[in-house]
Amino acid sequence: MGFTVTFWGVRGTIPCPMASHLGFGGNTSCVEVRAGKQCIIIDAGTGLRALGRKLLAEGVTSATLLLSHTHLDHISGFPFFAPAYTKGFGLRVISGHLTGSPDIESVMARQMERPLFPVPLRTMGGDLSFLEVPPGHSFKLEGGVRIHTAALNHPDGATGYRIEYQGRSLAYVTDTEHVPDHPDRNILNLVDGVDLLLYDSTYTDEEWAQRIGWGHSTWMEAVRIARAAHVKTLGLFHHDPDHDDATMERIEAAAKAEFPNCFAAREGTTISLD
């Protein structure tokens, strides 16, 4: 069975549905991973809505949703995920960044309460379960899939994931802020030798210097991490909504000049890790 990665949302912060952004896409973070029979979704940004329609059309009956964290750009697609309203659909929601109260189910329910949203979580007809896995822990899914986690440096916390299947690996590391000249050991350990690393590349180094403390990183740091951890392929992810297609093409070209096995993630594209 295959191991593929499909991008349904690659932006950070806020959707940007403008003509100037269509080449890379305007939806916020959402990635579909197929590992054998497992359907794994990473983050529930606005790209989740279109993915949900596709899963229903394909007759998929279950999925695991891994949340990096619960800032709005990473969960705002959840109320519009049609499979969660479908009787018999099994959805397992996993988070790692929350400690104590509130728990992940409470947070996901809160954004669906009045006056924020008219349809409460309790009306979802699917078979939903919620689980919290502390960062640094590992767990298995059915079919030989293993997932490792790591804490990230982000306001209110965030979790990075490494998914392994049949000798191949994917790491998803967003949202995180680096410290200059001090690579994050949690991240280096998580992504060591990974086949594909998707990394928070929101800013350039110059832009980042004006946004310290906002919880994000740069494509230059992505390259530094990829080199230090012997990453095979680097995917730039969580694009700034102010970066239009022309800007993203320049960033991608500059990154490829530094790390040839590199690309900027584009909504609607699929990568095979087989």
Image (cartoon, rainbow, N blue to C red):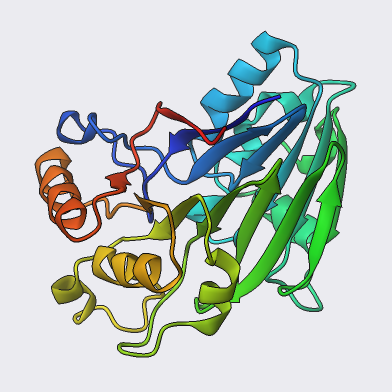
Question: Is 113 placed left or right of 274 in the picture?
Answer: right
Q: Is residue 156 visible?
A: no
Of residues 190 and 122, the one nearer the viewer is 190
Task: Please tell me which residue is depicted at 52% across the width and 24% down the height of the picture.
Answer: 50
Q: Nearer the viewer, residue 270 or 273?
A: 273
* Above or below 26: residue 233: below
Give the x, y percent position of residue 248: 18, 46
Residue 86 is situated, as x and y percent measured from the top left of the image, at 80, 21
Residue at 55 percent across and 29 percent down: it is 49
Left or right? Give the position of 81 relative to 19.
Answer: right
* Residue name at image x 26 percent, y 50 percent: 241
Residue 178 at what x, y percent from top left? Answer: 38, 80
Instruction: Answer whether residue 84 is visible to the viewer in this image.
Output: yes
Please say if 90 is above or below 130.
Answer: above
Q: How many marks?
A: 0
Quadrant in the picture for the C terminus: top right
Q: Quadrant of the N terminus?
A: top right
Note whether 17 is above or below 42 in the view shown: above
The x and y percentages for residue 239 are 31, 52
Tell me where residue 255 sits by quadrant. bottom left
